[in-house]
């Protein structure tokens, strides 16, 4: 019974490079959420997706960040031209419905040099 | 703008005693509250939740109390065990506001249970 899987677990990028974070939800879950946790902070909502649709991206920075959840394959959080301030832990969660409990993955720790 | 506040960064208790973790919120639209537990290098794990129509919810050793007038909730763990040592996050969402999926988290409280 696989839970939410995220890869890579650790990602190091230099300033200006692109970061791609992947999330495979719990089997059967069609709702995916991305959260970011900056050092010494709580998790902050970024985006909510269903298959092929972005439902709510109100927590996403306006520039450089994008997310998708294609019909086939994992959800992808993409950060273009990374800056040091993007260094954080990025958590993905999934649920079977949007009112149901969210189950979190182990996170991807992004370090920007 | 910290809408969910956990004012105690850390708490230390003896094994077998009660652990009480506190959480305050400021947004009156919040009507659903959750506690998550997080071990290092892992994602948060759901523990227990409570709707604003209730003032108490119990699950085994874990009980959550909600005081709506004070905008305060607490998590009680009785008896505490060393395996309970983790960071505990309080989270809130708004069903009535139509964004129940958008969890707002506190900064967390590190609980250490000493044998």
Image: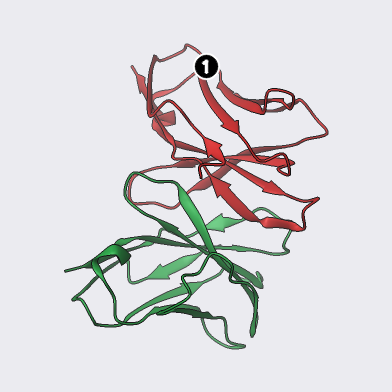
Chain colours: A green, B red
Secondary structure state at the residue bearing disc 1:
loop
Left/right placement of residue B16 relative to residue A12 reads right
Q: Is residue A63 above or below residue B91?
A: below
How crowded pointer 1 is (Cα within 10 Å; few <14, some 14-19, many 20+) is rated as some
Residue that badge 1 annotates: B79
Query: From this viewpoint, is residue B9 visible?
Result: yes
Percent coordinates x, y for residue B47 in the rendering: 58, 39
Residue occupying image coordinates x 65% and y 69%: A29
Residue occupying image coordinates x 51% and y 14%: B18
Percent coordinates x, y for residue A48 in the rendering: 61, 69
Residue occupying image coordinates x 67% and y 48%: B93
Percent coordinates x, y for residue B8 in the rendering: 42, 25
Instruction: Indicate the chain on which mark 1 is placed.
Output: B
Residue B98 image-quadrant placement:
bottom right
Percent coordinates x, y for residue A52 in the rendering: 64, 85
Q: Nearer the viewer, residue B28 or B66?
A: B28
Question: Total number of numbered labels?
Answer: 1
Left/right placement of residue A75 relative to residue B95 reads left
Q: Residue furthest front?
A: B1
Q: Nearer the viewer, residue A41 or B56?
A: A41
Q: Is residue B112 above or below residue B97?
A: above
Residue occupying image coordinates x 26% and y 71%: A83
Q: Is residue A91 above or below residue A19?
A: above
Query: From this viewpoint, is residue A26 visible?
Result: no
Residue A8 image-quadrant placement:
bottom left
Q: Quarter of the image for the C terminus of chain B: give it.
A: top left
Left/right placement of residue B48 relative to residue B44 reads right
Q: Is residue A59 above or below residue B18?
A: below
């Amino acid at each position: 019974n696989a839970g939410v899987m995220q890869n890579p677990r650790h990602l190091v990028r230099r300033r200006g490079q692109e970061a791609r974070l992947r999330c495979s939800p719990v089997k059967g879950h069609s709702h995916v959420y991305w959260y970011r946790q900056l050092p010494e902070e709580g998790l902050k909502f970024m985006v909510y997706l269903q298959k092929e649709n972005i439902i709510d991206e109100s927590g996403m920075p306006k520039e450089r960040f994008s997310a998708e959840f294609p019909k086939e394959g994992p959800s992808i959080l993409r950060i273009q031209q990374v800056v040091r301030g993007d260094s954080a832990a990025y958590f993905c969660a999934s649920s079977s419905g949007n009112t149901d409990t969210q189950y979190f993955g182990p996170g991807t720790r992004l370090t920007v040099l | 703008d910290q809408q969910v506040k956990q004012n105690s960064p850390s708490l230390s208790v003896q094994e077998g005693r009660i652990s009480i973790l506190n959480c305050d919120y400021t947004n009156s639209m919040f009507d659903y509250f959750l506690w998550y537990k997080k071990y290092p290098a892992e994602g948060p794990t759901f523990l227990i939740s409570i709707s604003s129509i209730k003032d108490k919810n119990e699950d085994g050793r874990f009980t959550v109390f909600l005081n709506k007038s004070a905008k305060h909730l607490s998590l009680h763990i009785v008896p505490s065990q060393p395996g309970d040592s983790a960071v505990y996050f309080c989270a809130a969402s708004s069903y009535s506001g139509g964004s129940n999926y958008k969890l707002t988290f506190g900064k967390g409280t590190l609980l250490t249970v000493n044998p």
